[in-house]
Image: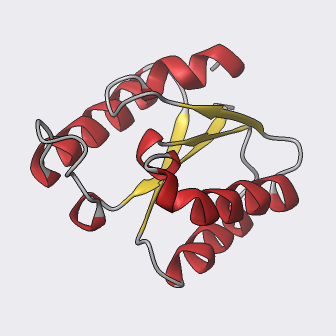
Amino acid sequence: MAKRVLAIGIEPGSADYSAFPQLTPELVRNYIDAQLLRITGLGYDVTSCLIDLDETAEAAVTSALREVSFDCVVIGAGLREPKERLLVFERVLNLVHQLAPNAAICFNTNPGDTAEAVQRWTAP
């Protein structure tokens, strides 16, 4: 059976791109879609959990984590930066820790290296 991966990130339309003027919601969406396909192609069963930056974020993550048992949870770089998102990031990380205590946790550094983050911690 394929290892299950949950990919948590910010809904591209909700992100602030002022610190990354080279990125657009469309470009980020394309990166996300390409990475999800790549992870699947590597033999993983991947679920995407894109969140808004409001009170619905915790509910979306909780729902995804309760749906199935995950072997790995990757948290996107856009959720960790800028520092104004620290509280949302901490809430998400604590939910993962609480609801998926046996899952490896990893982080990508940009929208294009999610598969590498997963592979560092979980074999297919």
Q: Position of residue 82 (x, y in %)?
A: 43, 50
| Quadrant showing the C terminus | top right
Percent across and percent down for residue 23 are 15, 41
Q: Taking 81 as reference, is 28 left or right?
A: left
| Residue in the foreground of this view, choosing between 27 and 68 | 27
**In the figure, residue 117 lies in which quadrant?**
top right
The residue that appears at 51% across and 60% down in the rendered structure is 85
Say which residue appears at 66% left-offset and 61% top-offset: 92
Height in image: 14 above or below 48?
below
Residue 124's place in the image compared with 80, above or below, is: above
Camera-side residue: 77 or 121? 77
Q: Name the quarter where the N terminus is drawn.
A: top right
Q: x, y (%) of residue 3?
A: 67, 32
Is residue 123 visible from the viewing direction of this image? Answer: no
How far across and how far down the image is residue 22, in percent?
A: 11, 36
Image position of 69 with respect to 54: above or below: above
The residue most toward the bottom is 55
Counting the numbered discs, the total is: 0
Q: Residue at x 21, y 65 (%)?
A: 13
Q: State the colouring used for the structure image.
A: secondary structure
At x 46%, y 39%, the residue is 77
Q: Quadrant of residue 4?
A: top right
Quarter of image, res 104 = top right
36 relative position to 88: left or right: left
Q: Is residue 50 left or right of residue 29?
A: right
Q: Is residue 31 visible?
A: yes
Q: Is residue 2 left or right of residue 98?
A: left
- The one of 6 and 51 positioned closer to us in this rendering: 51
